[in-house]
Amino acid sequence: QVRVVESGGGLVQPGGSLRLSCATSGSIFRITTMGWYRQAPGKQRELVTSITSSGSTIYADSVKGRFTISRDNAKNTVYLQMNSLKPEDTAVYFCYADIVAIATPGRYWGQGTQVTVSS
């Protein structure tokens, strides 16, 4: 059984920073890509950033230069450092992990963590 658990969301003022974490646990498996999506009220879920097992990254244009994704393969954990936060970054942030080499390979999602940027 695989679990994907996010942490680190909260309320922050514009210009502030937050660090999200996402830990994957369960049966022995191999993770390829991990990443973050976000969904704001009334909007579609959008890709924020992702990172492969070798460290290749992609970012949405709206977060380039402000957000940084990193990964600890030994801990099956991915991090999202968010700096210079803006009110438009307010959303529920969902972590995902693309898992192979298990009985049910596929994309596994966390439950989401709320990020609110407001003064």
Image (spheres, rainbow, N blue to C red):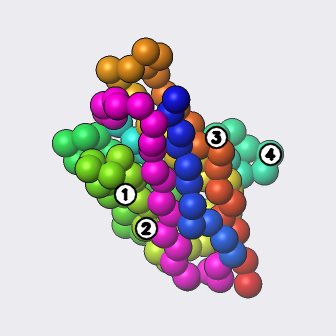
Q: Residue at x 45, y 44 (%)?
A: 24
Picture layout, residue 89 above or below residue 84: above
Which numbered disc, 3 or 1, marks the residue that appears first in the sequence?
Answer: 3
Q: Tell me if residue 26 is in the magenta stretch.
A: yes
Which amino acid, mark 4? Gly
**Residue 67 rendering spot, x and y as whole percentages:** 42, 64
Element assignment for label 2: strand
Give the Cα separation between the discs numbered 4 and 1: 26 Å
Q: What residue is shown with label 1? A: 69
Which quarter of the rendering shows the C terminus? bottom right
Q: What residue is shown with label 3? A: 45
- Crowding at mark 1 (Cα within 10 Å: few <14, some 14-19, many 20+): many
Q: Residue at x 34, y 31 (%)?
A: 28
Viewer-side label of 4, 2? 2
Which amino acid, mark 2? Gln
Point out the stretch of residues depicted in magenta. 12-32
Is any part of residue 64 visible from this angle?
Answer: no
Q: Are marks 4 and 2 in contact (CB under 8 Å)?
A: no
Element assignment for label 4: loop
Which numbered disc, 4 or 2, marks the residue that appears first in the sequence?
Answer: 4
Which amino acid, mark 3? Arg
Q: What residue is shown with label 2? A: 81
Which amino acid, mark 1? Ile
Of 73 and 9, nearer the camera is 73
